[in-house]
Image: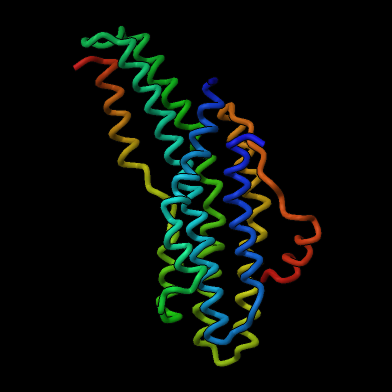
Amino acid sequence: MSTAAATGATIALGILGALVQSAPEVIEIVTGQDRKTLAERIERARKAFDKPIDTTEADDERRERLIRIVRGG
Amino acid sequence: MSERAGVTTFAVGLFLALLGLSFLGGCSPSQLALQADAAAVVGGTLAAVDRGIVDARDADLEALVEAARAECPAEGCDDARGDEILAAYDARLGLWSPLRACVEPAVQAFQGWLDAIWLASVAASSELGWQHVVGEAARLGLTWRGMRACIERSAARLGHPLELPDLPAFVYPFLESAAP
């Protein structure tokens, strides 16, 4: 598998995995099995996606690790 | 259809279907609850797309780190090769930045939609509240065209051509007329 194809498959599988993880809550929402108030429902929607994931810390850690590898130590 | 395209179409289809559902109903508590539920699922879909991009990005960058680990001895590579590896890593990191930024307009529009639902729930005039909800939902729908083009362009730069479905052409005039 080429690097590009591998990247594409990883993106696709990542999205699928995240959707599957949220499936129980989606089913609960769609079937109306919960007894939440309107305010609670709005708050749940807000929490569903309040902002994109912050990767700063993980990026810094990975680059420091790479520097240790290429420079030694 | 490839697995990649299938999953992407599924996620995008779910997003658009629920966005479309949000135009049904009115400003009664039960109808606003339907709006909020649709928004929760749309938000979950946006979060899944963001998570998928981040996971793919992590795997892609980790592969570069592991390749360096395999190449460089314990005392490190020579300075020139070390500089090359770091430059290649930074270049690859830079290619991912635009892809992540593509989601930002949708996040803002999504928050606007939620604010409108909340305001409609406390508005004195249900008609004005409803117009605001529809307008913000339309604004979120209109971000799709730009987000789609942005994701496809950024993915191509990563060497990964990606085709996402567009909304039917007749939808855009309706969204444009409804958006604030």
Relative to A49, does residue B3 appear above or below in the rendering?
A: above
Give left or right: position of B50 versus B11: left
| Residue under the point 44% across and 48% down | A18
Q: How many marks?
A: 0
Give residue A50's position: percent from left, percent from top.
43, 60
Pick the front one: A30 or B180: A30
What residue is drawn where x is 28% and y is 34%? Answer: A61
> Which residue: 54% across, 83% down?
B30
- Asked if residue A14 lies left or right of residue B81, the reply is right
Q: Residue furthest bottom?
A: B124
Q: Position of residue A35 (x, y in %)?
A: 41, 79
**Vertical side of B117 occupied by A50: above or below:** above
- Please say if B80 is above or below B99: above
Q: How is the image coloured?
A: rainbow
Residue situated in front as seen by the camera: B26 or A63:
B26
> Residue A41: x, y in percent?
44, 74
Answer with the quarter of the image where residue B157 lies.
top right
Q: Which quadrant of the structure image shows residue A71?
A: top left
x%, y% of residue A14?
A: 46, 41
Residue placed furthest toward the left: A73
Q: Quadrant of the C terminus of chain B?
A: bottom right
The quadrant the N terminus of chain B occupies is top right
Say which residue appears at 49% left-offset and 65% top-offset.
Answer: B40
Residues B155 and A44: in front is: A44
| Residue at the right extreme, as displayed | B170
